[in-house]
Image: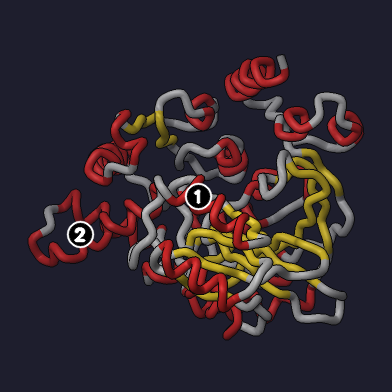
Amino acid sequence: MHANTSLARLPQLFKNEGVGGSGLAFDGKILLQTDAIENRFIFPEGALVGSMKKMAGTLAFAQQQCKPDFLLTNDEVLIKNLLRLRRNLQSGGDHLNEAQRELLLLLEKSLLPKDEIYGRSTSLQIAEKSGFNIPEGTVAYSSAQVKEEATRFGFPFYLKRNFEGGGFGVHHITSEENLRTTISSHFSSNIIDDNNPILLQKPCHGTEFTINFAAWNGKLLGYEVIQSLEKVRENGPSSVVQTVYRPNWEGMIQELVKHTYYTGFGGLDIFEGSYSDIPEVIEINFRPTQSLQMALQLNSTLISAFSECLLGKPANDVKACLHKDENRIATIFPDELVRDKNSFYALNTPSNIPWNDPKLLSEFLRKLKIKLM
């Protein structure tokens, strides 16, 4: 597991299902504070800027120490480096030693079979083949081409990395002046080339939802539909979420999982015009989402279904894991208090405060005190 705060509660949730875990992160990251992990491994400082060699060395050491069956992360810089590492190991063929073969096997289990599927434009094409609608979009491979495509594409549109990783984020572009400002502010430190293209995407209309899903070897284990009621910031992570029941999307999500032969957790960001409409997918994330950690508060079965597969049990029928508890509201801690320390939701709805993980709770409170002062 790796850095992000939204992963910090997952070790305890997996432990509840009989699955042990170790933590792999940068020094000081909150994930390493949980009592639920068995081993702690720290990336060297140089790995923070994306050094594959330093990341790979720490990962290889951790892999040999704890012999994991699966690697779970939502850090896209790490995913990019893991894909590079996998390509390097695959090119070694019969010359790999035993430790390298074990590491390659771990990466093969934990990553999508094809690197290009992590790109937003490719994953959206797969979503369309699976039956979803997708917004109009185009890809640019240089800052000059971004400007050219903007003239042809027309305003407004969203500008985002085809494969995030570097803090570029999502930018709402409304005019030529707005585009020039965004380019001057963000492009100088973000290379745009054949390996790091930019996606221009037309806006969608309707109600925005996130679909969380779990999959094992191309089989859908279950999914849940989440609506964000509050966010820490615009285009930022959710701080209050509500469940929505959409059984009619099962076939399309199953097709998506089958096409990608995915194992792990993922999320789709979608817009729905009405219940009878086919939803429009704006983004697919093949990694855990912010609301996956809300399993206990939302009565989610995704972690338990995935854990059973990790433990060697046969996968359940997806209908047994379909989330039916509609309109259940829960607060993500401490995100909602960061948004509003006097929040109505924080006082009146279930929250995933890690009461059974004292070290993690203490670290949250320490950081929260600094944030609110």
Compared with residue 176, is residue 289 higher up or lower down, i.e. above or below?
A: above
Instruction: Let me know if residue 73 appears in the view.
Output: no
Instruction: Let me know if residue 131 appears in the view.
Output: yes
Between disc 2 and disc 1, whose residue precedes? 2
Can you give x and y, in whole percent of width and height, for residue 65 in the image? 29, 36
Label 2 secondary element: helix
Q: Residue at x 79, y 73 (%)?
A: 247
Label 1 secondary element: loop
Name the mark nearer the viewer: 2 or 1: 1
Can you give x and y, in whole percent of width and height, for residue 250 in the image? 71, 76
How many dots with numbers? 2
267 to the left or right of 36: right
Q: Residue at x 25, y 38 (%)?
A: 54
Compared with residue 215, is residue 50 higher up or lower down, i.e. above or below?
A: above
Amino acid type at image mark 2? Asn
Q: Quadrant of the C terminus?
A: top right
Question: Which residue was labeled with disc 1?
Answer: 168
- Residue 279: image quadrant is bottom right
3 to the left or right of 16: left
Q: Residue at x 63, y 25 (%)?
A: 357
279 to the left or right of 367: right
Amino acid type at image mark 1? Phe
